[in-house]
Image (cartoon, rainbow, N blue to C red):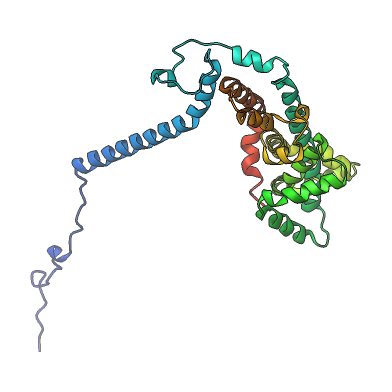
Amino acid sequence: MTTTPQTASTVSAPSIAAVPAIPRIVTKPATIIQRRRNQRVGLIISYIILVIAVIFAVYPVYFALLVAVRPNGQLLTNNLIEQFLPVTGISLNSFTTMIANTKDHTFLPWLGNSLFVAASTAFASVILCTSAAFALSRIKFTGRNAVLILFLAIQSFPALLALAPITILLTQIGLYKSLVGLILAYSAGSLVFSTWNLKGYFDTIPVEIEEAALIDGCNTLQSFFQVLLPLSLPAVALTAFFGFLAGWGEYVLASAIIPAPTSLQTLPVALHDLSISRSVPWGLFAAGSTMVAIPTMLAFLWMQRNLQSGLTAGGVKG
């Protein structure tokens, strides 16, 4: 029985046409143009929203400055253009009257009280919060987590609930109607947030750096002041800035702790009393409000670099 060899022509080769072809997605030029157009429209809308937000934020400050430089010191006028531009001219009489130490408007003593309270609160906040944050970050003691949880629990309560206890406590220790008692209240109020922020920043600094300082002959206090504090300067600057703000623009505690005499009042309380008089001198009130914002702006510009890094560095660990 013989077999005939199969020729190459009889072998069925796989058909190339049987393999399904992968469709090619061709992006139409019209789709790309539409996408770019949508992005441009979205960008324009974003800029419009930002411009409106800036106008709402800046115009009240500009309006206060506008009222302060009006010669007559009026708050409102019938001229629509004058609500936005100083059409009747510019005068500095409101500023000079506020700065002049008269019987009714003792602006410079009020300014001195506010600067003293704000600077003292910033200094006390740095001393108290750095010490507490260092202990909570570096020292392992029983109840450390309980202290941190207690700080969070205190922070959750509204500050107005502590108004009556603080007033009673300051009365018992003889610091009611005193700038020292007001500084003590402000420092205690800023203790929780600043301690948490500094504690989180201290946790980001390696412990080995302090251990190396201890090996070189430093004690615990020397390693804290010479090693840890210079490395944590952004967070310390942020703590000082928040302490300054707490003592500069706060009204409720200042009006409750120092209701009188007028010579001991801070600027927010004094300007509020000026605005509730029977005939409100709006030009003087606007001039004082404008000058109140200057120290805060100067403090922010002075510590701007440290504030930018201090706001975020403390939230990494904790």
Compared with 214, 109 (above or below) is: above
x 74%, y 38%: residue:
231
Which residue is at 74% across, 31% downward? Answer: 265
**Left or right: 25 as drawn, with respect to 97:** left
Relative to 253, 297 lies left or right: left
- Residue 129 lies, in percent from the top left, at 77, 44
Residue situated in front as seen by the camera: 55 or 163: 163
Rendered position, 318 above or below 4: above
Residue 213 in the image: above or below residue 107 = below
Question: Which residue in the rendered view is the most extreme toward the bottom?
Answer: 1
Can residue 100 be seen from the camera position used here? yes
Give the total of numbered labels: 0
Q: Is any part of residue 133 visible from this angle?
A: no
Residue 143 drawn at (x, y percent): 80, 62
Relative to 288, 175 lies left or right: right
Q: Give the side of residue 271 with respect to residue 63, left or right.
A: right
Which residue is painted at 46% across and 32% down in the image? 56
Q: Quadrant of residue 221?
A: top right
Closer-to-camera residue (181/116): 181
Residue 269 place in picture, x, y as percent: 68, 33
Quadrant containing the N terminus is: bottom left
Nearer to me, 214 or 199: 199
Question: Residue 81: percent from the left, percent from the top?
Answer: 39, 18
In this orientation, which residue lies closer to the viewer: 75 or 129? 75
Question: Residue at the location (33% across, 39% down)?
Answer: 42
